[in-house]
Image (cartoon, rainbow, N blue to C red):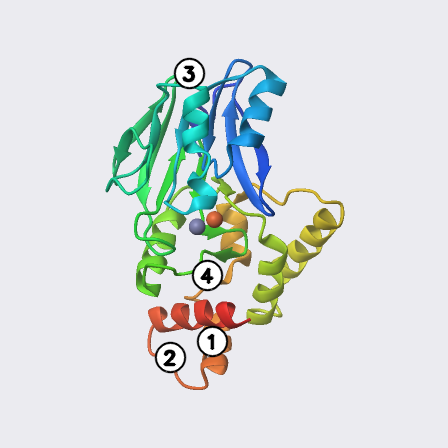
Amino acid sequence: MNPPSSSLPDQVVITPVQAFSDNYIWCLHDDKAVVVVDPGDATPVLAFCKQHNLTLSGILITHHHHDHTGGISQLVSSFPDIPVIGPSGGHIKGITQAVKQGDTITLSPFQCHFDVIEVPGHTLDHLAFYGHGVLFCGDTLFSGGCGRLFEGSPEQMRHSLNALQRLPEQTLVYCAHEYTQANMTFALAVEPNNNALQQHADKVSTLRKHQQITLPSSLAVEKSINPFLRSHLQTVAESAKEYAGHTLTDEDAIFATIRRWKDEF
Ligand code: ZN
Ligand code: FE
């Protein structure tokens, strides 16, 4: 169990702001200040700030893709001098505080601390932020799935997902996209007899029927339903072998096969 001190301060909540067709910009806020994660679009963030009379106090960036970074410049012109915390390398315009594996960042308006975890795979610069029982994982871990491998290798992604899996089971998982329903369809193709998955898929389809959000998830739930966290299991290995049409020698090969299967699904 997480010690109570690790939960978010009482007055701090996390609210999703929707952007584009299926992005979530997570807003960590109290009644005065807000820190946003991956603002791909400034417009809905500025509307959120105005509606709740909040001052934007910081931006966290998980990776360089435009749907996660496109709003930075406009937000910074509306709220100058705020920290923009994200990957190093200088390739993301507007980053003021480049961070790396093992760094801890402090979000000063709330006295919150987040650890930086490097999670290459979807992109090579991808970071996750973990603190107070909360994980912002961008496009690395989705509910029921994982990010497409645009830059990294299957081995890198599996290693990154393993690092996230070592966090406490009750960790709440705040992914950057509403992909859960499509992921459930694929997960059921991999593990048709997984009871927990069948039940979760039903729950998700009811939520989506009413246009409701399926997030946050938790690591405990993901370990029971997400095929990309289950490549060590016999059921997943058997399905992957069948898809590949030949024997798969190790877990990396199993993981790579289900990632390719999802791409082709
Ligand atoms: Zn991305
Ligand atoms: Fe994305």
Tell me what residue is drawn at x 41 percent, y 31 percent.
73
Residue 109, labelled with which disc? 3
The amino acid type of the residue labelled 4 equals Phe
In primary-sequence order, the first of circles 3 and 2 is 3
Say which element carries label 4.
helix
Tell me what residue is drawn at x 32 percent, y 52 percent.
120
Say which element carries label 2.
loop
* Residue 100 at x, y percent in the picture: 25, 39
Mark 3, ligand 2, within 8 Å: the answer is: no
Q: Answer left or right for 132 relative to 184.
A: left
Residue 76 is at least partly visible in this image: yes
In primary-sequence order, the first of circles 2 and 1 is 1
Residue highlighted by disc 1: 240
Q: Answer left or right for 9 relative to 194.
A: left
Q: Nearer the viewer, mark 3 or mark 1?
A: 3
Q: CA distance from mark 4 to mark 3?
A: 36 Å
Residue 57 is at least partly visible in this image: no
Say which element carries label 3.
loop
Mark 3 crowdedness (10 Å alpha carbons): few <14, some 14-19, many ≥20: some
Q: CA distance from mark 2 to mark 4?
A: 16 Å
Mark 3 touches mark 1? (CB < 8 Å): no
In primary-sequence order, the first of circles 2 and 4 is 4
Residue 228, labelled with which disc? 4
Mark 2 crowdedness (10 Å alpha carbons): few <14, some 14-19, many ≥20: some
Q: CA distance from mark 3 to mark 2?
A: 50 Å
